[in-house]
Amino acid sequence: MLLAIRAIIYLCDVMPRAADAIVRHGALSVLHGRLLLIEYLDVAEQSLQALENLSRKQPVPCLQTGTIMAILGFMDFFSTSVQGHLFRDMGLDLLHRASMHC
């Protein structure tokens, strides 16, 4: 699972338009599932990074699927640096971009 999530991250980095197809084919629910059922911390952290990448390209679907609530529910499990990174980059950027699209 870790390699699959990394592949999503790399695909979004190399081909930004792929985020549309990734979101359309249900990757958000899979990433949320990996985040909500933390079996391995590495998989959860990679899921967070993938959600961050997808939220930059597709902010409205991420908001609609509850990305922020899923992240806030499990902030305690991550290190302080990961928490700060998430709040700074994902949360604020997601809200700003979604307000521009609505």
Image: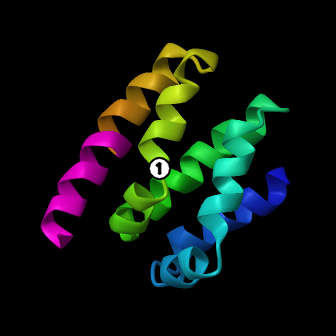
Where 54 sits versus 2, above or below? below
* Residues packed near mark 1 inside 10 Å, few (<14), some (14 to 19) or many (20 plus): few
- The residue sitting at 54% across, 39% down in the picture is 70
Q: Quadrant of the N terminus?
A: bottom right
The answer to which of 37 and 45 lies nearer the viewer is 37
Q: Is residue 52 left or right of residue 2?
A: left
Amino acid beneath label 1: Gly
Q: Which residue is mark 1?
A: 66
Which quadrant of the figure contains the C terminus? bottom left
Q: Residue at left 39%, top 70%?
A: 58
Q: Is residue 39 left or right of residue 100?
A: right
**Magenta extent:** 90-102
Element class at badge 1: loop
Measured as percent of width and height from the top left, residue 95 is found at 24, 50
Image coordinates of residue 50 in percent, x first then y, are 58, 55
* Picture residue at 19% right of the left edge, 71% below the top: 101
6 vs 73, nearest the viewer? 73
Residue 91, magenta (yes or no): yes
Q: Which residue is drawn at the image coordinates 77% and 37% (left, top)?
A: 37
Q: Position of residue 33 (x, y in %)?
A: 72, 49
